[in-house]
Image (cartoon, rainbow, N blue to C red):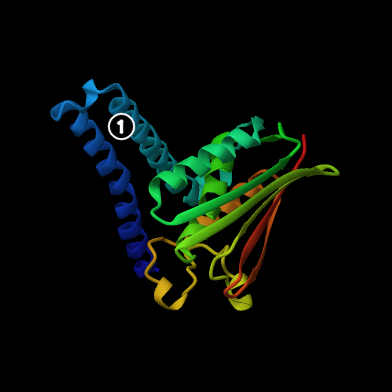
């Protein structure tokens, strides 16, 4: 347990330092290298700062939500959330920060689909799944995101063309601190909380999440949330 806690602390510290360093560099460039005088550059650097601060906020919230006391009382601030703009913002964020060639195929029906959810937490949950799809993939990533109403539920499906998850590991991927070993992919940064967090948040919405995966072909996550 102590080793797991130390590993979590080390990995989370690295995760927290990254957005701080990126934001600092962007602000430093505007203040000390006159980049702020160029309107285009200024908007670009401010956008970077905004995205990194959102990322930092999400990481901090993730730490809080994982504590035992917090987990028992964590409440979802549900509201009507238009799904397409949320997905589009996530797509832009990952295209900005990843150097892999990525293709996102988004199919949301109806076009203005509304879900009843906590905007920040459900956004973080979807972001965690997309992040895993990019990490555990080749140099060309294809992610299909589908969403629709079905009876009394809202369905969100995220499918990738990554390296897949074995049947044995599929049974444990939502366990706290569990990380799947994938040969030379085991050194991908992480701390074994991403999918645990996703499951906790989905369940806090009285929903469910399922996974299907085939080695070397890809993985599909299906989130089912109750419609309002």
Label 1: how many residues lie within 10 Å, few (<14), some (14-19) or many (20+)?
many
Q: Residue at x 55, y 54 (%)?
A: 129
Question: What x and y, as percent, mark residue 28?
Answer: 18, 33
Locate residue 69 relative to residue 19 in the image: left or right: right
From where the camera sits, is residue 199 visible?
no
Question: What x and y, as percent, mark residue 45?
Answer: 30, 32
Locate residue 42 relative to residue 151 in the image: left or right: left
- Front one among 196 and 122: 122
**Quadrant of the drawing holding the C terminus:** top right
- Kind of element beneath mark 1: helix
Question: Which residue, given by chain and number where applicable, does mark 1 sit on?
Answer: 45
Name the quadrant containing residue 61: top left
Q: Residue at x 32, y 47 (%)?
A: 16
Question: What x and y, as percent, mark residue 32?
Answer: 13, 29
Number of marks in picture: 1
Does 79 sit above or below residue 12? above
Q: Residue at x 40, y 43 (%)?
A: 60
Name the quadrant containing residue 219: bottom right
Locate residue 15 relative to residue 216 in the image: left or right: left
Question: What x and y, as percent, mark residue 163?
Answer: 53, 70
- Front one among 185 and 100: 100
**Quadrant of the drawing holding the N terminus:** bottom left
- Furthest-left residue in view? 32
Q: Residue at x 86, y 44 (%)?
A: 151
From where the camera sits, is residue 126 visible?
yes
Name the quadrant containing residue 148: top right
- Front one among 6 and 156: 156
């Amino acid at each position: 347990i102590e080793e797991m806690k130390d590993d979590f602390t080390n990995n989370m510290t690295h995760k927290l330092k990254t957005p701080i360093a990126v934001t600092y560099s962007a602000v430093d460039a505007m203040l000390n290298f006159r980049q702020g005088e160029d309107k285009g550059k200024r908007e670009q650097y401010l956008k970077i700062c905004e995205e990194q601060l959102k990322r930092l906020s999400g990481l901090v919230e993730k730490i809080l939500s994982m504590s035992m006391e917090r987990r028992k009382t964590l409440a979802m601030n549900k509201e009507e959330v238009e799904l397409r703009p949320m997905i589009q913002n996530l797509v832009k964020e990952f295209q900005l920060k990843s150097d892999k060639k990525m293709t996102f195929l988004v199919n949301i029906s109806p076009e203005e689909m509304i879900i009843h959810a906590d905007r920040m937490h459900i956004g973080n949950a979807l972001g965690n799944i997309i992040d895993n799809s990019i990490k555990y993939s080749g140099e060309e990533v294809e992610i299909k995101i589908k969403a629709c109403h079905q009876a009394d539920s809202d369905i969100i499906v995220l499918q990738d063309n990554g390296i897949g998850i074995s049947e044995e590991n599929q049974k444990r991927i939502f366990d706290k601190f569990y990380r799947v070993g994938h040969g030379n992919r085991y050194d991908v940064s992480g701390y074994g909380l991403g999918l645990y967090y996703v499951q906790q948040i989905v369940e806090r919405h009285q929903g469910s999440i399922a996974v299907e995966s085939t080695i070397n072909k890809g993985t599909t996550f299906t989130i089912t949330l109750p419609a309002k």
